[in-house]
Amino acid sequence: MTIKEIQEEIVDEFSMFDDWMERYEYIIELGKSIPLIDEQFKTDDNIIRGCQSKVWLYAELNGEKIIYTADSDAILTKGIVALLLRVFSNHTPQEILDADTSFIDEIGLKEHLSPTRANGLVSMIKQLKLYAVAYQSKMTQ
């Protein structure tokens, strides 16, 4: 699946819920299926700055695709990062860099988060894309 197709799937899933309490519950459920970061990568170097809670994000190149793993000490944040990993993991650096994140606005996520969580969401996306930039430059050397 392309990133765009995954994003459309997520928008469809969120449209099935009547209110934001159900959407929050769904996000929390997503966090339970997150590809968990290996304990050895739960270091200060892998913590995303700008998040209210602790979020660890690790990326590695597998062939030409980036595989992300993550974890958080907060259940809602873990669900948010799981949503992002679902979109961006298993794609090439260029696909990740070219992807827009308008699906977040389409599902109304940012407007239903506290300002600090919304900042954390932006920081997570920024870090995902920074990994893509790093691996892209490694691949073109």
Image (tube, helix red, strand yellow):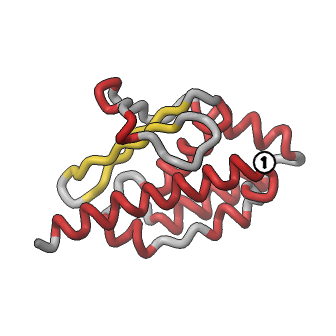
Residue at the image point whose x is 32% and y is 47% from the top:
59
Say which residue label 1 marks: 114
Residue at the image point whose x is 64% and y is 70% from the top:
102
21 horizontally vs 51: left or right: right
- Pinpoint residue 76: horizontal percent, then vertical percent: 67, 35
Q: Nearer the viewer, residue 127 or 61?
A: 127
75 horizontally vs 68: left or right: right
- Pinpoint residue 127: horizontal percent, then vertical percent: 44, 56
- Pinpoint residue 44: horizontal percent, then vertical percent: 39, 36
Which amino acid type corresponds to the residue marked 1 in the rendered image? Ser
Splitting the image into 4 quarters, where does residue 42 fall? top left
Q: Judge the density around disc 1: few (<14), some (14-19), many (≥20) Cα neighbours within 10 Å.
A: few
User: Which residue, as the protein is rendered here, is positioned at the far left?
Assistant: 141
128 horizontally vs 4: left or right: left
Vertical position of residue 33 compared to residue 103: above or below: above
Residue at the image point whose x is 88% and y is 46% from the top:
19
- Pinpoint residue 66: horizontal percent, then vertical percent: 30, 54
Residue at the image point whose x is 73% and y is 66% from the top:
106
Report the number of discs: 1
User: Which residue, as the protein is rendered here, is positioned at the far right?
Assistant: 19
- The C terminus - image quarter: bottom left
The local secondary structure at tag 1 comes to loop
- The N terminus - image quarter: bottom left
User: Which residue, as the protein is rendered here, is positioned at the far top?
Assistant: 39
